Image (tube, helix red, strand yellow):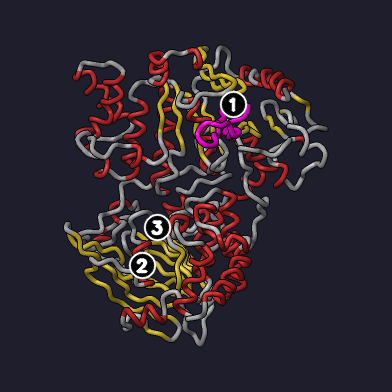
Amino acid sequence: MATENGKSLLEIRDLNLHFQTTQGVVQAVDKVDFDLGYNDAIVILGESGCGKTSLARAILRLLPRNVDRYDGKVRLGDMELMGMGDEEFRKKVRWVRMSMVPQAAMNALNPVLKVGDQVAEPLMIHAGISKENALSHASDMFRRVGVPVDFLNRYAFELSGGMRQRVAIAMALVTTPEVVLLDEPTSALDVLTQTNIFNLLKRVKQEFDVSFILITHDIATSSELAERVAVMYAGQIVEVSDAGNFFEAPLHPYSQKLMASVPRLRGTQDLEFIPGKPPSLIGLKAGCRFAPRCSFRFDKCDQDPPITYKGDRLVRCWLHAEG
Amino acid sequence: MENIQKTDQNQVNTMDNASKNNGTPLLSLKNLHVWFELKRWGFAHAGYVRAVDDVSFDLHRGDAIAIVGESGSGKTSLMKTILGINRPIKGDIFFDGQSLSELNPRQLREFRSKIGFVQQDPYGALPPFMSVRRILSEPLIINGIKDPDEREERIRKVMSEVKLNPVDDFIEKFPHMLSGGQQQRVVIARAMILGPKLIVADEPVSMLDASVRVEILKLLENLQHSHDLAVIYITHDLSTVRYFSERIFVMYAGQLIEKSSVDGILSNHLHPYTDALLKGTSEPDANNAKIFKEVPPGEPPSLVNPPKGCRFHPRCAKMIDGLCNVEDPPEFEPAEPGHLTFCWLYKQNGHES
């Protein structure tokens, strides 16, 4: 992970986002810690309902109305984000220094606006430049993400899925942010389109000096971009490792089970699945949240596992706790 | 007709499976063409969308095949034709030796009771206002099982077969109360309840989480073996195929372009498109992030006016000018028997089968 003066680009400590519902408080993001370096790419890996999209919303402060608790520490470069008011956050951070490619980006485009105008819009709002200028930036961005420039005047329905995804990426990059959150950027795309998009993201990462947070449930394709992997389970991050170590030998029992469930093209190992299902995020008890499904479970697992650092790797499990 | 010569070849090809399994195939597709007519102003003919163009294969009892292709390759149109929803414009489907085009509506209903269908999105496939019991009794009622006790017995039997245990915990539930994996089990139970001979599964695991995916694949595999079912597994994900099927058919732009055993595809694939698909499929490996992958340029062609000759030639790096862009490739069998490909590259070292 690349740092400047020993500091990472984005530092997240003890971030919580809880929602109030009629059934009780949903602990969607609970005590999350991680760092993002300069020109880095971290994958947030988790199954549906583990809180990974809520984590993205917590980072970009795109909150629904029923928030019960939202606190923690988020530092971006030299800015403390949590102390900011909403208006200041909107003007100085969102889409200026951090942007997002939303889930199902193909449906996130406005159907009644030309895609060129949609890409130009963040520039007109945040950089305050004229429409002509913004459009010329947009056409430059289109060229760089591999969309023909004459598509500026098209509407979203006239584009294929892969092209729409590229437009959504252009929209996130046009303000040259430092951090881009990608929420399942390729989950609805075909294999070859998916490969194309990842090629594009790799090139963008080299050219733009940008850092990615990739949120996905797909372990195999996440390796196309990952420098580091953070595994999320039931609202918590249970492991953060560099990609090499993670794909070879994950530490947390949940990560190990996940890796064993990935279908491979070649090889002979048998596929495993994880019996049981993730806990409800309402009314969680103390103790390790994975313990009921874990084959290594022992007495200590009834207490909250501590975070242990092993070199650069972080793991939240009693098996790896010191002492 | 340009197709006449090809038709003869294909009739020979449909024999190639017979060596493995003697007797009439359970399902046999003969030169199947499914074209959808395009209309201008609601009545004037404006061409066809050639969703499925000259597809032939045989499927025997107990066989599991996978049809792999990208969206728009015609795999869903092919599936719907097999289910008797679309009518082919040319060619025919034979189920147990009986031609589908000759069936009257009552016979068609009976035919459909012998095929189970597993949909892609379990939540979308289950009516939200019906309990599991209602969902599973519906096919029984339609197929004339009037005795409620017999229905209840069959529902409980099929639910324990798909491991919705204990049955009493699930039978009164509504789809939204079940997890994704459990919903997919209900869909599979519904497909199995009439005792089908063939299961058509359209991307049965693509909407599920990784850890559940394996569970459902294993369940389908167990059902296939215990009931001697034929299974058509439709997917775009090559990596799950090998856990389930014996043969793979690769589909591109409405045509089957390679037919092979799973091992044949993985160890010795022939068609350049299959090669691209395999290279595009990721394995969890940290080195992936360091390299750029090769992808054929462009996008799949429009099926209204597909390219002349081989449909992959505009994107193919090995295109032979004057051949690939002129003439439809016939089926070659260059490597091992039963491994067929429609590609001119194998004109020299392969014999036309």
Closer to viewer: mark 1 or mark 3? 1
The residue singled out by tag 3 in the image is A46
Where the C terminus of chain A falls, by quadrant? bottom left
Image mark for residue B187: none
> Mark 2 falls on what kind of element?
helix
- Mark 3, chain letter? A
Residue type at tag 3: Gly
Name above or below for residue B190 compared with residue A246. Answer: above
- Mark 1, chain letter? B
Query: At x 34% / y 79%, what residue is drawn?
Result: A73
Q: Nearer the viewer, residue B232 or B157?
A: B232
- Confirm whether residue B307 shows in the render: yes
B77 on left or right of B130 = right
The residue singled out by tag 1 in the image is B33
Residue A286 is drawn in which quadrant? bottom left
Distance from Cα at disc 2 to Cα at disc 1: 48 Å
- Mark 2, chain letter? A
Q: What secondary structure prevails in the magenta region?
A: strand
Do the residues at discs 2 and 3 belong to one chain? Answer: yes
The residue singled out by tag 2 in the image is A57
Magenta residue span: B33-56
Q: Is B47 within the magenta?
A: yes
Mark 2 Cα shell of 10 Å, populated few (<14), some (14-19), many (≥20): some
Residue type at tag 1: His
A113 on left or right of A59 = right
B136 on left or right of A189 = left
- Residue A114 placement (x, y as % from top left): 50, 62
Do the residues at discs 1 and 3 belong to one chain? Answer: no
